[in-house]
Image: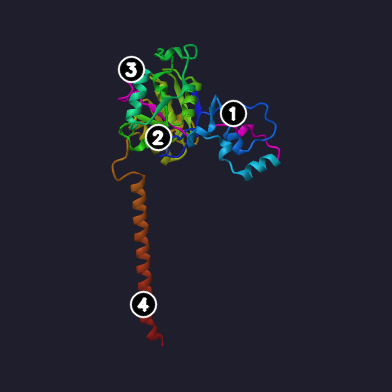
Amino acid sequence: MAVASTFSEEPGIEEPGIGHRRALRDPQCVEPATADEVAGQQLDGQDCEGLSPSKAPMLEALPEDFLRFLKSNGVPLDAFRILLDTSRYVRVNPRGALASVGTPAASAQAVSEALGGARVERVSWLRRTEEEAVPETGAAGDDDGDFSPPWAKVYACDVSTNLSRTEAYRKGHLFGVDAASIFAVLCLGVRPGDRVLDLCCAPGAKLCAIADAACPGGEVVGVDIAEPRLAACRTMLNKYSVTNARLSLGDGTTWDPQAASWFDLEPPPRGRGQRARKRKRDVAVAAAAAVAAESGEVAEEEEEEEAPSRR
């Protein structure tokens, strides 16, 4: 059994991109450069001044006070000579309507149209050569020589793309993901038929990718200590029609499959979810407060009635 330990984001914010970072190569630099100097440097033959805000050099975004602090403390700026890539990433659901599109160009065009015409491009560093491909996946090379399995098709679009408003996202044809999460699944080397344990599995985007990688014949068990976060995983599994996953409520450091508490994958009936329970608690608290207040008023009236007799 393969084990994947994952640490993910809060529900509702489906996995934001960490990004593809490339160094601004300047091995001869001795003195730390200022933000203005970095803005004029070249990257792969392109002037940084023409980059969009989502592709701006990090040094250009840092305040001068912080740059002076780094310089005064002898901190080399090489670690900050990177491009900030705040792209948003989407993964094609292998069971969705966009999975059957043929060529890479046609697939990219279909994803672009599904995102309302947004400019998209395949995430190149997730591609796999024939030597890197897992034979059991049966992934055949496409026209671009990419041997990635169907579940690992990830596209980058501008961070301003409103994924939640697109029909493709609402209907489960596209996942909102962190590209690095898909890279982690590729590194795990999940094969069809594998059984995988995913600890701290919420909110579930990586869990779904592992489940897809284990198909056919495999499964993934997701464990999380928080019931609301497991509920978020359940929502994702149902939304994207993932059927080879199970969820368990528990502490991953002590989790025992023989004594596991399994989480119901059927969504609760309307009015019996987390929000409904909270509303019922609020109503009960308000009712108890009203009873307490009424009892206090009655007690005060009784004291007022007894006061004349005492006098």
Q: Which residue lies at the image location 55% right of the left edge and 34% below the top edge?
A: 57
Q: Is the C-beta separation of discs 2 and 3 under 8 Å?
A: no
Q: Position of residue 142 (x, y in %)?
A: 39, 14
Q: Residues within 10 Å of mark 4 (few under 14, many from 20)?
A: few
Q: Earlier in the sequence, mark 2 or mark 4?
A: 2
Amino acid on which the number 3 mark rests in the picture: Gly
Q: Position of residue 250 (x, y in %)?
A: 47, 36
Q: Residues within 10 Å of mark 2 (few under 14, many from 20)?
A: many
Residue placed under numbered mark 3 in the picture: 102
Q: Earlier in the sequence, mark 2 or mark 3?
A: 3
Q: Which mark is residue 24?
A: 1
Q: Earlier in the sequence, mark 4 or mark 3?
A: 3
Q: CA distance from mark 3 to mark 1?
A: 37 Å
Q: Position of residue 108 (x, y in %)?
A: 37, 23
Image depth: mark 2 or mark 4 in front: 2
Residue placed under numbered mark 4 in the picture: 302
Q: Which residues are magenta?
A: 73-100
Amino acid on which the number 4 mark rests in the picture: Glu
Whether residue 54 sits left or right of residue 59 in the image: it is left
